Every structure is written in structure tokens, then in C-alpha cells.
Amino acid sequence: MKRLLTLFALACALFIQCARADIAPVALTDVHFVKTEAGKLRLEGMVKNLTDRSLRQVYVAFNLLRNGMVVGYTTAITFNLAPDDTWHFEAPCRTRIFKPDHFRLAELSAIP
């Protein structure tokens, strides 16, 4: 029984540490569509590291929507974002049939 409780406590500690990786303090701002010279759409925006240490990885993902319906998905990732630095991301909108008219944040994660 004691062994089982020890394993449970270790599993809980591991779960909490993994969950904390997704809550690193970053700020997402100025996200908007941009039309490229080739006529394609992409999302651009900024993510600022609000911590006093580097973030090993920062990842953003967005659902692309047309009239409220998901028609695509786009992502961007960076590595080693320094303390207090801002990352200007560009995420291509690769949809074949429907062009999105708005977007919704699907995921924002940072790993210290």
C-alpha cells in the first residue's frame, strides 16, 4: 500500500510539472490576417516572453474560420525566446477551398 501511495504521489508531481509547462507567462498580441504578394493569406502577431528566463519553446495554433465554421488550422513555433523578448510570428493559411474570414486561438503553449 505504501508503495502504491508513493507511485501515486510521483505520478501527481509529474502531472503537475507537465501541466505547468503550458502555463508559462507569455502575452499574445496584435494577431491579424495579412495578404502576401502572391495573394495568399497568413496570420501574423506577436508573443512576448514575460518571464526573467528563456523559454525553450513557444507554440501558437489557430483555427481558421469562415462564417463560424472551421475551414483550416495553422501553427507557428519558435525556440529559445529570451527573457522580455518579443517573437513576431507568421503562420500561413493553407486552405484549399474556403478562405477564412476570422480565426480563433486553439493553443498557446510555452516550455521553460
Image: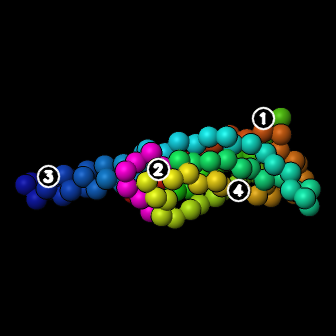
Viewer-nearest of labels 3 and 1? 1
**What is the spatial separation of the Cα atoms under label 4 and label 3, in whole angstroms?**
47 Å
Query: Sequence-wise, which precedes: disc 3 or disc 1?
Result: 3
Q: Is residue 111 visible?
A: no
Judge from the rendering whether residue 31 lies leftward or rightward of residue 108; answer left or right. Answer: right
| Amino acid at dot 3 | Leu
Labels 4 & 3 near each other (Cβ < 8 A):
no
**What is the spatial separation of the Cα atoms under label 3 and label 2, in whole angstroms?**
41 Å
Looking at the rendering, the stretch of residues picked out in magenta corresponds to: 49-57
Residue 16 image point, x, y percent: 31, 49
| Secondary element at tag 2 | loop
Q: Residue furthest left?
A: 2
Q: Nearer the viewer, residue 9 or 105?
A: 105
- Residue under label 2: 84
Image quadrant containing the N terminus: bottom left
- Residue under label 1: 68
| Secondary element at tag 3 | helix
Labels 4 & 1 near each other (Cβ < 8 A):
no
Disc 3 crowd, CA 10 A, few/some/many (<14, 14-19, 20+)? few
**What is the spatial separation of the Cα atoms under label 2 and label 4, in whole angstroms?**
20 Å
- Residue under label 3: 5
Query: Sequence-wise, which precedes: disc 4 or disc 3?
Result: 3
Residue 55 is a magenta residue: yes
Judge from the rendering whether residue 49 lies leftward or rightward of residue 5; answer left or right. Answer: right
